[in-house]
Image (cartoon, rainbow, N blue to C red):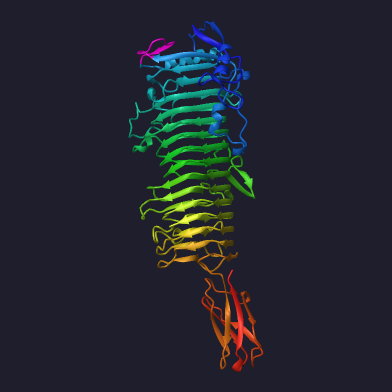
Amino acid sequence: MANLYHDQLSGSDLHDNKAYASTGTELSPASQASYDNRWTRQTRTISTAAPLSGGGDLSANRALTLPAATASQNGYLTSDDWTTFSAKGYRFESVVGPASSTGNDYTCTGTNDDVPIQAALNLVHAAGGGRIVLRNGVYTVRPELLRIYSDTILEGETRDKVIIQVTDNGTFSRVFRIDGTAQTYATNIQIRNLFISGALVYPLGQSPRSNTFGIACGYVENLVVEDVRFEQFEMGLSVNTGRRIWVNRTVDYTGSLTGGSKNLVQLLGVSEGAVTNCIHYGNDTALRIQGCHKLYLGNNKCYTSSIEIGNAQGFGYSDYIIVAGNYLEDAPVNLINFSDGADQVKSVLGYSAGVDNVIVQGNTFRLHSVANLSGVLGENFTTGTISSISNVTVHGNDFLCDTPVTIKQSGVSTMANNGRAINWSITGNTFADFTGASVSIVSGIDVSVHDNKLLHFNRGAGLGQAYDRCAVAVRGTATYGSSYVSIKDNSMDGNATAFALAVYLDDPSLIDHIDIEGNNIRGVGGGGAQPIYMVNGKPSGVIRDNQGYATESSGIAAAAQGTTSITINHGLAMTPVLKDITVTPTNSLGNATKFWVSNPTSTQFNINVNADPGATTATFAWKAVAL
């Protein structure tokens, strides 16, 4: 016999039995008491002899009601939405505990505990949904035998004290599974306060076998996974096709050990959701996002593991992803085009974009010990020549490199290999102490680098190639050049290291329409250092008004009696062309009747007159511009 409750209010929260107002705030004690009095207790006997079958779908009238998105997040879900989760319908509770506890509906012995746990799951499913409580203890289960159905809450008593350890079947291995179908999604499932461990088979320090999962889901919507700890799996949580997925305070610490866990969360083909406040020490990927739309990834901590956003066969492209407020130590954000299949990309300016519309904002990147990383990296793993990563905003982040000077690291790299970076905006960030390029623009079109602080770039003092020793590098490849790049209003300090190059400009045959304006360039006085380095001359575009790189100069000069030529030291950072040198006489020129300009070089040009001006001399105001 188990207790069955019918909730007569639509605003209840199934996690803590408290009701919430429509604004998401908890009700007053008096209102709460009134709410409690409206519960109607019922009882009925339900047979638990046979397991249930089927897709796990139940009546839609108990669907979770999602809160309205806040305007500040532009339609994305945030951790604030957790408190406004509500459900309506039936509530049924079953308690499972170890042999040392009493008052259980089901008691586990430590061997094949999947049997009583699944019996409780089946009972709740037959009741039309409800909650299973796992009391503190150690449970030993076999893989592939625990299935969670729709309208179910599976909740442990205390996260680190409800330990579910799995044995191994030597093949595909899932501890918990949620199996919806394309026609009938599993829906309204919440999993909380569990410690799911694979260390019984793969002790800490060993690599877990491939195809091992803590929780694996297919075709699921309205899923909450909160306060769950994973240990020694290839993948902690995997969702294969889903809608409205929330993952909060989920952790895996074991990847800090050699050969430990690999991945924390994998979302494939998911629309709408959030992954927040998670912690991952791993050897691979903390958050793998492929073929997903409208996700918020916020306030997570990732160590030696990446956030990977890309497309995937069977799941399509990814777009409208926010990565905000995370701490990432040796943990890059990788934007990857894996496939050029027609159903895996979207068209952007005639290119095939595997990833589109990504905001990376307010994160802290610390590149500490792993060689050849970039904090934010665009990549293309296909052989297609029209692949791209498009519409990316990198704003307000802190990038810090504190690796040994022999290890090369970069802050942002728009494209690591063949492909296009389209419409990237890199603004308002701080880059400090990088041993490689702070910002590397490769194969970029319509890229803005504005209002950043790029401090102590070239800390490697000549490490790598010339394009590795700069604050901003603009480069092209044999396939794609870079065009329409704006580098404006940045503060660049090379800290007087040798070979520091504030801006690196590739061969003009590879880049064009490069505008460099209003930057403050300093600390480039070391040996071999230059404010703006050009591989083979200036590309098209404008270079002007940069402090530390003179592109405009003026003065007064006079041709004395007995001379017909004046040499002017213009002081410009580039060689001016004749059309950009203006000379205006300020007197009658004496005996001379004509004047002209000749021989502009990197340091000088000449003003000439056709005759000795005599005692009155010939005086001129001049202005030289190199843009």
Q: Is residue 81 visible?
A: yes
The percent coordinates of residue 334 (x first, y second) are: 49, 45
Residue 30 x, y percent position in the rendering: 56, 17
Asked whether, in this view, residue 142 is left or right of residue 40, the answer is: left
Q: How many marks on residues?
A: 0
Q: Position of residue 298 (x, y in %)?
A: 51, 38
Majority secondary structure in the magenta region: loop
In this view, 596 is above or below 146: below
Q: Is residue 105 magenta?
A: yes
Report the magenta residues as a range: 98-109
Residue closer to the observer: 41 or 235: 41
Pick the residue in front: 446 or 420: 446
Q: Residue at x 64, y 83 (%)?
A: 586
Q: Is residue 494 magenta?
A: no
Q: Which residue occupies 44% across, 32% down?
A: 235
- 103 is higher (above) or lower (below) than 466: above
Q: State the quadrant of the C terminus.
A: bottom right
Look at the picture and state if 343 lies above or below 191.
Answer: below
Question: Which quadrant would residue 256 be assigned to in this image?
Answer: top left
Decide if residue 512 is in sight here. Answer: no
Q: Residue drawn 54% across and 10% down?
A: 4
The location of residue 427, given as percent across then percent down, is 55, 51
Q: Is residue 468 above or below residue 212?
A: below
